[in-house]
Image: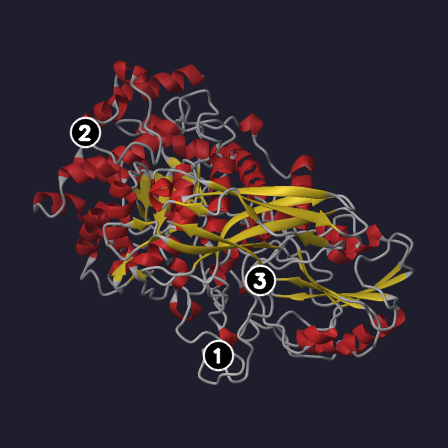
Amino acid sequence: MRDVRRRTLLSAIGATAATGGAVGAAGAAGPASDPHDPRVRRLLDRMTVEEKLGQLQQLPWGWDTGPGGGASEAVKKAEDATRAGRLGSVLSIFGAKATNALQRIAVEESRLGIPLVFGLDVIHGFWTTFPIPLAQAASFDPDVARKDGEVSAKEARSNGVHWTFSPMMDVTHEPRWGRIAEGNGEDPYLTAAFAAAKVEGYQGERGEDGSDGSAAYGAKDRVAACAKHFVAYGGAEGGRDYNTVDVSESRLRNLYLPPFKAALEAGAATVMASFNTISGVPAHGNSHTLTDILKKEWGFDGVVVSDWSGVQELIPHGFAEDGAAAARLALDAGVDMEMTSTHLLTYGKKLLREGKISGARLDDAVARILRLKFDLGLFDDPYVDEGDTVDGPTAAAREAARETAARSMVLLKNEDHPKSKHKVLPLKPSVRSIAVVGPFGDSGDLLGTWSFPAAVKKYPSVKVLDAVRRAAPGAKVTYARGVDPEGEDTGGIPRAVAAARAAEVTVVVVGEPPAMSGEAASRGDIGLPGGQEKLVAAVAATGKPFVVVLVNGRPLTMGGWLDSAPAVLEAWHPGLEAGNAIADVLFGKVVPGGKLPVSFPRTVGQIPVHYNHESTGRPYDADNKYSSKYLDLPPDPQFPFGHGLSYTTFETGEPKLSRERIAAHALRRGDTLEVSVAVTNTGDRAGDEVVQLYVHDVTASITQPVRKLRGFRRVTLGPGESRTVRFRIGADDLGFWTNAQDGEFRVEEGTVDLYVGSSSRATARRRLTIT
């Protein structure tokens, strides 16, 4: 049967096309241009204008309907367009039977039999929900993101999904912005490392199929990745989603673009445009970013897809006067596929006839989409084997989710309790009584934003209460909710206080519901919602030992309760195995080793506060009123980027350089130097430390950040064990982009300070001179 399907597809493009040259790897040699891959060229020559425009269209599917059901207008629209050969892609469809049925219409009923590509938001898991991406970044271990991508790709592809709209790599200094949960925090270097790893997890590493570096995502356990949102979406003013971004060229290139470059170098097949304007020009109509930088300067030859109705939104942006203008502006700027709105399909033929868009640009966009389908193997085998469908988390996938969740947690605080005279954490499994209190202690809703809706219903997260009971089987474990997640009613607090008084130790589980972070979930106040702070204060007033476990999708302000809490564990939204992973850390089965990928502000009025801020002419001076500061706040965040404690202690030595002087021209031609540092576990148990390298260009033609992360390494050390960690740095680490519109990267002569330590507050320093 598979051979029959293959012959049907190949007949559409001609016999010689089956032996055409290899498909170009995304982001490789350069943008699409004639001559096209022979298979693509032959197919393009047979297509009508309507069929070409159809390939540029992506339509949504109904979650709970299937082909032929007639229950959804969206479904019928997609089926009719498929049959007419005027549809290139469908999003939000999944399941082997549903995708095969719609694909069969495309392959067997349309004139040319061109297969559809099916896309879905697989953000941090399909059936197996991993920790949110912000949490994954806290692991400072890119293999965490890689494992998520591998598991998610296998589950999704077996359910007919070819393409995920992930990873999101929007660097942001704005914790009020809900979509911070989907990204990797405030630093471009860390984000770039995780973006590349996630792409490799989804797609496979280039060349792993035995070729010379071409796409590996044609395999039946891989999906095409989508680097989003291009670009500067994380700079939204006021943290309000979809809002304006005003950004200089140097900041665009130094802060927002590096993760995208890393993702494309890892082979990302597609890129998604962002909702925001970029210095007055909407991203969907921004030829400078989509064409000049992405397609020409970087040579990206993959697909640029719009975000949901992003082409249509050029009209309310005030950039396009109507749908026809929106179609023209988006296509000319570099958008290749339109998601949900239909202006390219509706107005494209008229625009061509009037000479307002070119046939060459249309063919370029269609060629990119067809090459994606060839890369995915859809012309060889467009269907999913319904007998091989993964229909739920496997034991191995659950274990991976549990390990990565625990690896992503950050111990913010762990002090001696005044009565017990020892640290609250780790808890002893022999403890006789434990109170679990708080609105999330007995919750199965710790999966996080952008979890796969079908998985949310079928596979809720493991509850903290249940996991604590398993971790301490001999203990009496009681539970009291105290307050609702967002409610102001404090009537349940006395019961929670009684439970805390009766227990040896209390675990207070508070934070945000998943719906309070993610897209369209910006917050003006990022403290604990509702009456949760009152619950923490009431438990603290008992004088008994307790630990606060935070489950949240963004940095939170902590107010007065932080001083009264002897121990605080940042667990984020940990995913499917939430409760088990939290218990693993609380009871010391896993020693916490995560670090913050984003600064935690003291109050909202302090935002933006981030470690990689630029120098000012009047830097903070506590004794000088006329310096850059607030009258009522310290200058630094509550917890800085890179902060995280352990159940053991570490000592980082003084950094050493392989050379203390290097020529700028040598760096420009690829020369490097080594930074090494010894790190020692000075405690009595094994644990993980993340050694971090920061650079500061002391004097430059453009003011530089006071620190930039340029290396990190997570190492596991036994008690008393030492290791030398080595970093190699070069021009990319010591130079910067200027404000030149056509892109100018400089490595200048001068002095650079190199800092090494366990957070962005590292003090161990070595000076490098660039001559």
Query: Looking at numbered disc 2 in the image, what kind of residue is underneath it?
Result: Asp
Given residues 591 and 552, the one toward you in this image is: 591
Rendered location of residue 662, percent (x, y): 41, 45
Q: Nearer the viewer, mark 3 or mark 2?
A: 3
Query: Looking at numbered disc 3 in the image, what kind of residue is underneath it?
Result: Arg
The dot on residue 629 is 1
Q: How is the image coloured?
A: secondary structure
Query: Looking at numbered disc 1 in the image, what kind of residue is underneath it?
Result: Lys
Left or right: 94 in relation to 113: right
Which SS class for mark 1?
Answer: loop
Residue at the disc numbered 3: 761
Q: Marks 1 and 2, how far apart in space?
A: 57 Å
Q: Are marks 1 and 3 in contact (CB under 8 Å)?
A: no
Given residues 670 and 541, the one toward you in this image is: 670
User: Tag count in the figure?
Assistant: 3
* Residue for point 14% across, 38% down: 359
Which SS class for mark 2?
Answer: loop
Residue at the disc numbered 2: 34
Rendered location of residue 126, percent (x, y): 55, 43
Reading the chain from its start, which is encountered first: label 3 or label 2? Answer: 2
* Residue for point 63% across, 51% down: 408
Reading the chain from its start, which is encountered first: label 1 or label 3? Answer: 1
Farthest residue, direction left: 354
Q: Nearer the viewer, mark 1 or mark 2?
A: 1
Which SS class for mark 3?
Answer: loop
Q: Is residue 308 visible?
A: no
Left or right: 396 in relation to 308: right
Left or right: 405 in relation to 268: right
Rendered location of residue 754, percent (x, y): 51, 54
Give the quarter of the figure containing the N terminus. Answer: top left
* Residue for point 49% across, 63% down: 178
